[in-house]
Image (cartoon, rainbow, N blue to C red):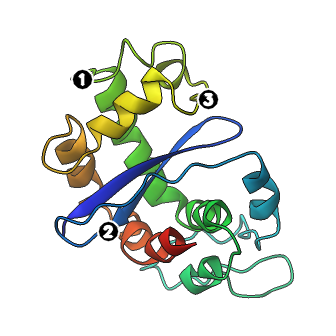
Amino acid sequence: MKLLFVFFLATAGCATAVSSGNEGGDAAPPKKDAGAAADASKQPTADASQPPTADSGTTTTDDAGLVVDDSTCATATTKAGCQQCCIKLHTTGFGVYTQALDSCLCTSPAACATECATETCANKPTTAGDACETCIDAALVQGTGACYDAVASACQGDVDCTDMFGTCIPPCQSK
């Protein structure tokens, strides 16, 4: 499976998202604005006692007992709200993805270590449009990005990661 990676900003820190794309397809990088936190807070939250694992047979529910799944996230009114729902639902997969990305950006091959030294590599938020964000966007380009292969390999090796970026994130892109 080919993956098209995109980067977006989180209000409290750096976060990233991946979507599966058609081969050769391009998607504009989504940007999370300050209003997205409010949108995300309107989404049902996963019950911490039930981990969001797609193949364990466990169903994730919100505090009202309603099932929270990929289709629930797709009903969010904004792209950022949808993406945040997916991240909350697929925490294991998102962790695999961010670990691989952060390692590539900051450690080996350190594709953006200089540009992101005071942001992503210091576990701080990334500023929209700055050198760090530009570098991350370039590092995730399919075929030419310095981090694409490592991140794709890590994500494809984890069921929750491929579920997140194969079924949950794609409907967010049209919002």
Q: Amino acid at mark 1?
A: Ser
Q: CA distance from mark 2 to mark 3?
A: 25 Å
Q: Categorize mark 1 by other alpha carbons within 10 Å: few (<14), some (14-19), many (20+).
A: some
Q: Amino acid at mark 2?
A: Ser
Pointer 2: what residue?
20
* Residue name at image x 40 percent, y 31 percent: 134
**Percent from the top left, x then y, of residue 121?**
46, 21
* Residue name at image x 66 percent, y 81 percent: 68
Q: Categorize mark 2 by other alpha carbons within 10 Å: few (<14), some (14-19), many (20+).
A: many
Q: Say which element carries label 1.
A: loop
Residue 90 in sight here: yes
Q: Say which element carries label 2.
A: strand
* Residue name at image x 38 percent, y 64 percent: 19
Q: CA distance from mark 1 to mark 3?
A: 21 Å
Query: Would you identify the image quadrant in which residue 133 lies?
Result: top left
Q: Categorize mark 3 by other alpha carbons within 10 Å: few (<14), some (14-19), many (20+).
A: some
Q: Nearer the viewer, mark 2 or mark 1?
A: 2
Query: Would you identify the image quadrant in which residue 1 lies?
Result: bottom left
Q: Say which element carries label 3.
A: loop
